[in-house]
Amino acid sequence: MKKFRWLFFGMIGGIGLVVVILWVVSVSNALAEPAHPAMASQQTPPAPWRDESGQTGTTQSDGTSDEKSSITIASDTLGPSVLPTPVPGETQVFFTPTDNDATATVLYLTNTDTVAHVVALRGFSYNGVLVYSLNINVGATSFLRLVSDSVASAPPPSWATPAPIITNFTDFTYFASLSLPKGVKVEGYVVFNPGTGVVNPRLDQGAIPLRFSTDPATVFLPSVAH
């Protein structure tokens, strides 16, 4: 009889423990629910990012942005690994321009010949597809400057005459080529213009010289001192 009495009290205690646990769980769930049903679907959106030019948004909507291609080429007209055919009598050089929202490429073309020449500038994507094309007329014994971004207003005299030619490579040009006729020389560098997208020759924006090569495979190799 005593054994059954302890069994009865054990069953009553177990039922009471289960009731207490269920009550605690229900209270915890009630505290975790929002005070208003509509709050359950609200989330704090992530902070908007800012690109190098200071614009805020999820995508760049500016049609002149360096991160939007400025040219559309039909995929069936050009295949991968298409490089320009060297022009007889001209020197073809390759280089890697940089043209995004924080950098720009500056090129100098000097014609030491007594006759005018046309320089073919071509830009290619990462797989060798042509994405930029420009033919530049360089007068006899003359000089031209090419810039991949806009130039600040009222530039210094050396940048005002002759006015620079805008070569908007955009961020889709991974490497480029120049076909240099006899007597035409080239030099260039990459300039930093963070937060502006405008090249200001009156400011010290820092620059890195461009590396030119007649062999496209060596453009990306570092200089080695012997």
Image (tube, rainbow, N blue to C red):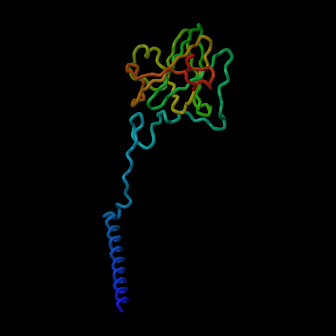
Relative height, residue 203 to residue 50 (above, below): above
Q: Nearer the viewer, residue 210 or 119?
A: 210
What residue is at 65 percent from the left and 34 percent from the top? 80
Outermost residue toward the top in this view: 114
What residue is at 56 percent from the left and 9 percent from the top? 112
Residue 121 position, x and y percent, is 58, 23
Outermost residue toward the right in this view: 88
Relative height, residue 4 to residue 68 (above, below): below
Image quadrant occupied by the N terminus = bottom left
Q: Nearer the viewer, residue 181 or 103?
A: 103
Residue 33: which quarter of the image? Answer: bottom left
Residue 192: which quarter of the image? Answer: top left
Relative height, residue 200 to residue 125 (above, below): above
**Is residue 117 shown left or right of residue 197?**
right
Outermost residue toward the bottom in this view: 1
Number of numbered discs overlaid on the protein picture: 0
Relative height, residue 22 to residue 9 (above, below): above
Image quadrant occupied by the C terminus = top right
What residue is at 51 percent from the left and 13 percent from the top? 143
Residue 28 position, x and y percent, is 33, 67
Residue 110 position, x and y percent, is 54, 13
Residue 155: which quarter of the image? Answer: top left
**Is residue 122 shown left or right of residue 19?**
right
What residue is at 50 percent from the left and 36 percent from the top? 68
**Is residue 160 shown left or right of residue 133?**
left
Residue 137 position, x and y percent, is 57, 17
